[in-house]
Amino acid sequence: MKSSLILFLIAINAIFAYSQGVKDSQGNIIPDNKFTSTASGLKFYIYESQGLAKPVSGDKVSVHYTGKFLDDKIFDSSIGRGKPLDFTLGVGQVIAGWDEGISLLGKGDKAMFIIPPQIAYGSTDRGTIPANSTLVFDVNLVDFAPQKKIEEYNTKGKDTITTSTGLKYIIVEKGKGKKTETGTNVVVHYSGYLKDGKMFDSSVKRGETFKFELGAGQVIKGWDEGLYLMQEGDKCRLIIPYILAYGEAGRPPQIPEKADLIFDVELIQVLPPIVVEKFDIKGKKEYSTPSGLKYYIVKEGIGELVKSGEKVQVHYTGYFLDGKIFDSSVKRGQPIELSVGVGKVIKGWDEGLQLMKKGDKFRFLIPYSLAYGEQGYPGAIPPKSDLIFDVELVNIVK
């Protein structure tokens, strides 16, 4: 009864705080009548406008932001990290409320967004962001770069070859470099299209190549099969049936259900396999947390523990319980960078990384409830999969 009363009072306080208006980064209260509402439920107020051009879908934007709940509690901010968030507008790399809201701003504009759950994280519990949360963002569109014009491959007069799995491919331009094989790391540029010609993703637009280990299940099956057929310098169009892509469920909002996909792929480089050495935990103590996370300290680092909201660089290798590797930054030869404690990674990582210091090497045993849950991750992680991660905290980005 007492806990129910406390929760009730918290909810009442949040509603009362919201009724008084939300605060910008300077602490100024902006009343609700200052906001404009859109059909999706987004509320926005541009409190500082430069009158400059606005970005469009496909442009790369840089945004400084502070994210809060209705009670003014901050859950994430780029300000403390000293680096704006860069992403491609309108392609689903951020929550729908951001894609819509940022498109309303001009370069240099500052605004407040009130984003309801249906265009934020919905009914998903993100750890630091509870399910069905309305979010408040104070944003500054620092800059944007117009999208690069992408020309679809010209396949006119080229032969379409169909494999036994149903994959179709067209060789647009033949290279002369090394051939691929299982375990090699491949560096590619690609643009992905739905059957109606709409582009849903492109490394070319981002200006960043994509690197992955061939045959390790790090990409959809159609890619793993298609890249086996290529060599350095090849440009191919892959026409991938949904059973070799994201299956019946798709990957909303970018990929609809049962979506056949088209990829224009250039194989830029084939690199030799990198051998991963599994952490040696012999003689090491196993620790447990109340959530069910288990871990071993393999090597001690130095300094302070990682704090929620900090950005870190980590090397990792992920294993199933049978010892099979399903993903590894070590094999790709490049650590990943991520923000801790803000729901950008699985719960086991958000919790585990906050137990680490720079230079630490830990093994995490993560139950499926703290990983990809009952549904798993289609194409990569089966349902109800407990996972093992060997993680090295390379750096805390200040």
Image (cartoon, rainbow, N blue to C red):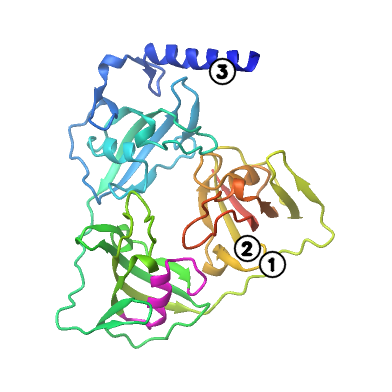
Which of the 4 image quadrants contains residue 52? top left
Q: Which residue is mark 1?
A: 278
**Which residue is the extreme one toward the right?**
283
Badge 3: residue crowd in 10 Å (few <14, some 14–19, many ≥20): few
Q: Is residue 85 above or below residue 236?
A: above
Marks 1 and 2 in Cβ contact (< 8 Å):
yes
Residue at 38 percent across and 67 percent down: it is 243
In this orientation, which residue lies closer to the viewer: 65 or 167? 167
Q: Main secondary structure of the magenta part?
A: loop
Left or right: residue 393 compared with residue 205: right
Badge 1: residue crowd in 10 Å (few <14, some 14–19, many ≥20): few
Q: Which residue is mark 2?
A: 319
Dot 3 or dot 2: first in sequence order is: 3
* Quarter of the rendering occupied by the N terminus: top right
In this orientation, which residue lies closer to the viewer: 5 or 60? 5
Magenta span of residues: 214-234
Residue at 25 percent across and 50 percent down: it is 59
Q: Which residue is mark 3?
A: 7
- Separation of marks 1 and 2 at Cα, in angstroms: 10 Å
Where disc 2 sits, the SS reads strand
Measured from the top left, where is residue 34 in percent x and y?
A: 26, 17
- Separation of marks 3 and 2 at Cα, in angstroms: 39 Å
Measured from the top left, where is residue 48 in percent x and y?
A: 26, 26
Say which amino acid is labelled 2.
Tyr
Residue at 52 percent across and 54 percent down: it is 376
